[in-house]
Amino acid sequence: MGIEPPKGILLHGPPGTGKTMLGKAVAEATDSTFIEVVGSELVQKFIGEGAKLVKEIFELAREKAPSIVFIDELDALAATRMDVGTSGEREVQRTFMQLLAEIDGFSALGNVKVIGCTNRKDILDPAVLRPGRLDRLIHVPLPDKEGKEDIFNIHIKPMTIEGELNFDLLIAKMNDFSGAEIKSVCTEAGYFAIREERNKVTQEDFLKAIEKVSQEEKDFSYKEMFG
């Protein structure tokens, strides 16, 4: 068609909605090498070598092409640039500039694609989202009612359930839950049964599990806000 395919996409949305899983599924479906990188590790664990590591990662991607470079927590690396003061901030800046250089350096027909992933699209530097970089934005939202039912069914399939479950009640109580939280509910329900030395999980176990996961989420949000 005479057009250039996009070099990369950005998956954005709340935590636990399956963005990383989606990236892996794309790699599997296209029979590609999947290289996962965590932005926070590049700027913390390997301080002083971030730019070098980014270069090496993309060299590996070219060698193993077709491949997908999946960058989780992209906001840790590509947040909006401010006045660069400390050495740590300068290092993040160098690493980010190396990332942009690697993306810009790909040929249009290259078999290396980049998938960025973030929970905070609002703080990303516009430079990484401009045309020719990660210019395809895909929102991965919390699952709807049908999605919650599908996810719940997947995780209870290997479980032994006692009696009938009131799906409408359980799904309603998991109103704002992500896929990861629904999985956690099933795990916790199993633990409630184990603690009472039962080998079957009941409706009551799931209700208590929902309450526990909800409370943990509230506690986590409180700690984020107030430390």
Image (tube, rainbow, N blue to C red):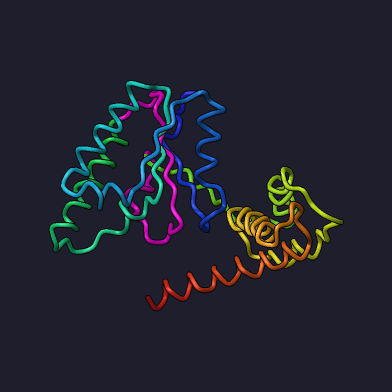
Picture coordinates of residue 152, whole percent (x, y): 71, 51
Give left or right: position of 103 versus 208.
left
Left or right of 165? Residue 23 is left
Instruction: Identify which residue is drawn at 57% across, 28% down.
Output: 29
**Quarter of the image that includes the C terminus:** bottom left
Residue furthest front as drawn: 197
Q: Position of residue 169 (x, y in %)?
A: 79, 65
What is the span of residues highlighted in magenta in the rendered image? Answer: 106-132
| Image position, residue 72 (x, y; %) | 41, 47
x 32%, y 29%: residue: 106
Residue closer to the observer: 54 or 156? 156
Q: Nearer the viewer, residue 201 or 96?
A: 201
Disc count in the image? 0
Identify the residue shown where x is 70% and y is 45%: 154
Please report the residue visible at 36 percent of the width from the left and 56 percent of the height from the top.
124
The stretch drawn in magenta includes residue 108: yes
Q: Is residue 114 above or below residue 75?
A: above
Residue 89 drawn at (x, y percent): 19, 58
Q: As drawn, which residue projects farthest toward the right?
A: 164
